[in-house]
Image (cartoon, rainbow, N blue to C red):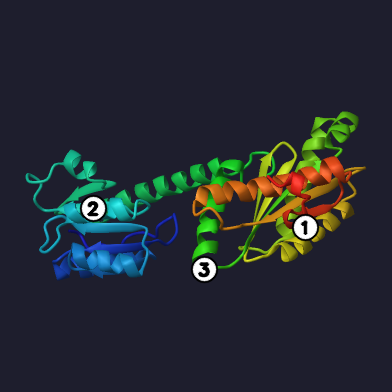
Amino acid sequence: MDPSVPTPNPFGPHKILVVDDEESLRDLLHEALIELGHSVLVAENGRQALARLAETPVDVIITDLQMPEMDGMELTVEVRRRYPEVDVIAITGFSNRYHYAEVIATGAADFITKPFTLDKLEAKLIRLFRERSLRARLQEMAQRDPLTGLYNRRHFETVIADEAVRSIRYRHPLSLMFMDVDRFKQYNDQHGHRAGDALLVTLADILPTSIRDHVDKAFRYGGDEFLVVLPMLEQAGALKVAERIRTNYRKAGLGKTSLSIGIAELRVETGDLDRDIEQLIRRADASLYHVKKHLGGDRTWCADDLPAALEP
């Protein structure tokens, strides 16, 4: 293997785990990958690698296949099962023993045989980083509403489930806010659909600036309906956030439109997480319905204050 100094990686630093029972190869790969700007961990075999992964997440594993205790094939299978977001590049000097298709079938992203140059390994890494970047962009696009850039309804379903699990596990409250734009149809009819789209974009810009950064999440649910997930907030706290959103919306001066908002807090009642989440959504939606149909809109209502006849 040619130990020439590699060129900088154009895709930025990654965290890489090198797994090999040969100390000289581990050291060489460690030094070369550090030169590329990556953060590098090392392990002597598959068992040690899994212990490293349990402590520190990585992006890529470069592993020899022939190792004691747990070989690279077994490691690759376990990584694919436990850490599907981690990519594996397999290395072997036994090219007749391991076939490319067999290694890829275990879940490895690529395969390289000894002896190899660092240039060849670098090229494989760059291709892998390019694919990871593309996957990340595609995943982000799948989670975003194309008009507003907010998270979409599909991603909301994932987030609300995750937050409900955390709420129950750590015994902290979780509130959900449903909102829509009052007189949005009239605004569209008067100003045109482009103006209506611009209004929705403006609301989408208001939401992140009115909620807690990196804690709360805003979503476009569909049409002029939006959602905000509020971890660690009871209804009283969520009500303050809702009023801040409505105040900021009024300041935007969007004609005669206003916001109606319904709020509900997660109740752990049925012993069935999916049913409890469904009930949370229904109660927030019922609160919004109460505001729109019975109170004339332009206000916030909490599910705990719903008339008994409107409880879902």
Which callout, 1 or 2, points to the residue nearer the camera?
A: 1
Can residue 287 be seen in the rendering of this structure? yes
Name the side, left or right, on which 223 lies relative to 268.
right
Q: Nearer the viewer, residue 150 or 278?
A: 278
Q: Is residue 159 above or below residue 34?
A: above
Residue that label 2 marks: 76
Q: Which amino acid type is marked by label 2?
A: Thr
Q: Is residue 237 above or below residue 227?
A: below
- Amino acid type for the residue under numbered disc 3: Tyr
Q: Amino acid at mark 1?
A: Ala
Coordinates of residue 275 in the picture (x, y in percent):
54, 47
Q: Tag on residue 242?
A: 1
Checking the image for residue 170, the label placed there is: 3
Quadrant containing the N terminus is bottom left
Q: Which residue lies most toward the front here?
A: 308
Instruction: Answer few, some or many: residues within 10 Å of disc 3's Cα (few below 14, many 20 plus, some between 14 and 19).
Output: few
Answer with the quarter of the image where residue 263 lies: bottom right
Q: Is residue 65 left or right of residue 268?
A: left
Q: CA distance from mark 1 to mark 2?
A: 48 Å
Q: Where is residue 51 drawn, in percent x and y?
A: 26, 68
Q: Of label 3 and label 1, which has the lower sequence position?
A: 3
Q: Secondary structure at mark 2?
A: helix
Check residue 222 in the rendering and tell me which mark sits there, or answer none. none
